[in-house]
């Protein structure tokens, strides 16, 4: 596995939205879903705004791999559930980046209910 470059981290985390697609069992990509993305340290994270039953989230966790598009970049990635300890830092990043959309919207991706549905994106 390769680490994100600083340029990739800056570009992707600077984008308001990310497109994410998981892989099917035959290796083909599912349709892309638009989602918010944040950077905490040298990692990128996404969260399911509608809990663990959100179809894109279930498929991403089951597949463990997919592709993202953001800021003119397209990368193959692996999907792993984030460590519980990263929750507060990721919450802060979501607030910093997206609070302008209001508490009702940002509230869906921060806090104790959002932490278990956090996926870390790593280069594949």
Image: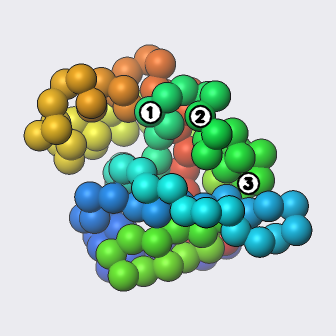
**Along the horizontal axis of the image, is 56 left or right of 59?**
left
First along the sequence among labels 2 and 3: 2
Dot 3 lies on which element?
A: loop
Can you give x and y, in whole percent of width and height, for residue 85 in the image?
49, 30
**Along the horizontal axis of the image, is 14 left or right of 111?**
left
Counting other residues with Cα less than 10 Å from the Cα at mark 1, is it few (<14), some (14-19), or many (20 or more)?
Answer: many
Can you give x and y, in whole percent of width and height, for residue 63 in the image?
77, 53
First along the sequence among labels 2 and 1: 1
Residue 71 vertical position relative to residue 46 in the rendered view, above or below: below
Q: Is residue 6 visible?
A: no
Q: Residue furthest front?
A: 31
Label 2 and label 3: CA atoms lie apart by 16 Å
Q: Residue at x 46, y 72 (%)?
A: 69
Query: In the rendered image, which residue does mark 3 sit on?
Result: 64
Dot 1 lies on which element?
A: loop
Label 1 and label 3: CA atoms lie apart by 19 Å
Query: In the rendered image, which residue does mark 1 sit on?
Result: 49
Counting other residues with Cα less than 10 Å from the Cα at mark 2, is it few (<14), some (14-19), or many (20 or more)?
Answer: few
Residue 2 vertical position relative to residue 118 in the rendered view, above or below: below
Q: Residue at x 54, y 50 (%)?
A: 120
Mark 2–mark 1 contact, CB under 8 Å? yes
Dot 2 lies on which element?
A: loop
Query: In the rendered image, which residue does mark 2 sit on?
Result: 54
């Amino acid at each position: 596995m390769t680490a994100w470059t600083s340029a990739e981290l800056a570009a992707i985390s600077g984008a308001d939205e990310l497109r994410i697609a998981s892989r099917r069992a035959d290796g083909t990509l599912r349709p892309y879903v638009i989602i918010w993305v944040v950077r905490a340290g040298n990692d990128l994270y996404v969260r399911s705004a509608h809990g663990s039953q959100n179809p894109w989230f279930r498929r991403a966790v089951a597949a463990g791999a997919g592709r993202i598009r953001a800021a003119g970049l397209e990368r193959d990635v692996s999907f792993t559930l984030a460590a519980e300890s990263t929750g507060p830092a990721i919450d802060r990043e979501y607030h910093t980046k997206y609070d302008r959309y209001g508490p009702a919207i940002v509230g869906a991706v921060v806090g104790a209910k959002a932490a278990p549905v956090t996926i870390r994106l790593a280069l594949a």
